[in-house]
């Protein structure tokens, strides 16, 4: 079964049409489906519309969050409620075309775990398209997963992906990156991008700043999430070494001058070097200590199952009892 998770924020006008289009496409292609609409603190009549759709159609269910928690939280709530083997995320503004569903499923059946939509022909203004291209290039260089459109709201993945990755804040756009870091196979597929018919964009200029900060978070989580001491320790050792070299040079200069009976002359000319070396030494010690504390925290709180990802099993008992049962 296909579970379609749609975060909703003041999208009352488009929900009925979205459901009708999804129902038509799935019926034509014989797809068993369910639609999970997550109201993320809407202030219009979105929740009333969701209730009406759920009452009239057995495939529709709704979840209402107590306030606006953000798209990632809404997606997580919907994914936890999903009952299908395949999970799709889709925006509610009708810019994502439900007609792409069969193609995405076919692509997934070729052996991939995540299919990311690519709005090859975007119908957005240039001031949104250009920064998006720059941002996608940065993601590819920093994470190693090169996709044309990481931020596309149309994504399809296997249920195992939703069970292994955790998203919060603004990390929903990095689902393919997080999945790729755990060994899942990711591919992209060009999809139709339609003009907005109802409502207005939820994103502004601040989106790009938050996206860059989230990219740094993802880079740290995927590269050093289980070994924070490696990056913090390396930085700490660098500053410790820099400070030690500086102070060592000044100490050697003082000893050399004293041995020759000369005035060491370590005065105002060398004061900046002394200050910077001492500061570097202190900074290195603090960063190294922070790395040790981070390693201790990870070792105490990490779930052993989160340090690896199993692709499949063979042989043995299909169902293993839980310890102590």
Image (tube, helix red, strand yellow):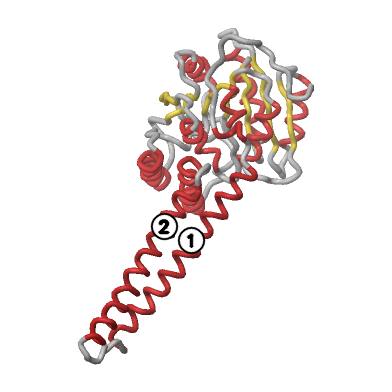
Determine whether the residue tagged by mark 1 lies in a helix, strand or loop: helix
Label 1 crowding class (10 Å Cα cut-off): few <14, some 14-19, many 20+?
many
Do the numbered discs 1 and 2 sit on residues whose CB atoms are within 8 Å?
yes
On screen, residue 259 versus residue 242, left or right, reads: left
Residue 193, percent from left and from top = 46, 29
The mark tally for this picture is 2
Gap between marks 1 and 2, in whole Å?
7 Å
Lateral position of residue 252 relative to residue 126, left or right: left
Q: Measured along the vertical axis of the image, is residue 30 above or below residue 198?
A: above
Q: Which residue is mark 1?
A: 287
Q: Position of residue 11 (x, y in %)?
A: 64, 36
Q: Position of residue 23 (x, y in %)?
A: 63, 16
Rendered residue at 46%/54% (across/down): 232
* Mark 2 closeness class: few <14, some 14–19, many ≥20 residues within 10 Å: some
Q: Which residue occupies 67% across, 26% down?
A: 16
User: For this rendering, which residue is in front, 170 or 11?
Assistant: 170
Give the position of the N terminus as an image quadrant. Answer: top right
Q: Residue at x 44, y 51 (%)?
A: 231
Q: Is residue 227 above or below residue 311?
A: below
Q: Which residue is mark 2?
A: 235
Q: Where on the picture, by quarter, is residue 267?
A: bottom left
Q: Earlier in the sequence, mark 1 or mark 2?
A: 2
User: What residue is drawn where x is 43% and y is 39%?
Assistant: 124
């Amino acid at each position: 079964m296909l579970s379609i998770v749609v975060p909703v924020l003041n999208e009352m006008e488009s929900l009925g049409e979205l459901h009708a289009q999804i129902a038509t496409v799935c019926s034509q292609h014989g797809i068993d489906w369910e639609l999970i609409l997550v109201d993320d603190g809407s202030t219009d009549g979105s929740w009333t519309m969701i209730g009406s759709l759920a009452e009239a159609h057995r495939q529709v269910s709704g979840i209402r969050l107590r306030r606006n928690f953000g798209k990632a939280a809404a997606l997580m709530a919907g994914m936890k409620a999903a009952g299908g083997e395949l999970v799709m995320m889709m925006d509610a503004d009708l810019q994502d075309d439900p007609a792409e569903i069969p193609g995405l499923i076919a692509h997934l059946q070729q052996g991939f775990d995540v299919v990311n939509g690519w709005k090859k022909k975007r119908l957005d203004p240039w001031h949104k398209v250009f920064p998006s291209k720059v941002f996608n290039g940065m993601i590819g260089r920093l994470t190693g997963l090169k996709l044309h459109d990481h931020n596309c709201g149309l994504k399809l993945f296997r249920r195992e992906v939703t069970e292994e990755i955790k998203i919060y804040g603004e990390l929903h756009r990095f689902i393919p990156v997080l999945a790729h870091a755990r060994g899942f196979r990711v591919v992209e597929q060009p999809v139709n991008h339609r003009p907005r018919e109802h409502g207005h964009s939820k994103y502004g200029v601040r989106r790009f700043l938050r996206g860059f900060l989230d990219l740094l978070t993802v880079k740290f989580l995927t590269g050093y999430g289980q070994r924070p001491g490696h990056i913090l320790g390396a930085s700490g050792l660098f500053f410790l070494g820099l400070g030690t070299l500086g102070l060592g040079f000044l100490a050697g200069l003082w000893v050399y001058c004293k041995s020759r009976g000369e005035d060491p002359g370590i005065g105002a000319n060398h004061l900046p070097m002394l200050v910077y070396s001492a500061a570097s030494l202190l900074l290195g010690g603090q960063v190294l200590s922070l790395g040790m504390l981070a390693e201790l925290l990870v070792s105490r709180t990490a779930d052993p199952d989160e340090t690896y990802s199993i692709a499949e099993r063979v042989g043995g008992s299909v169902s293993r009892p839980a310890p102590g049962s």
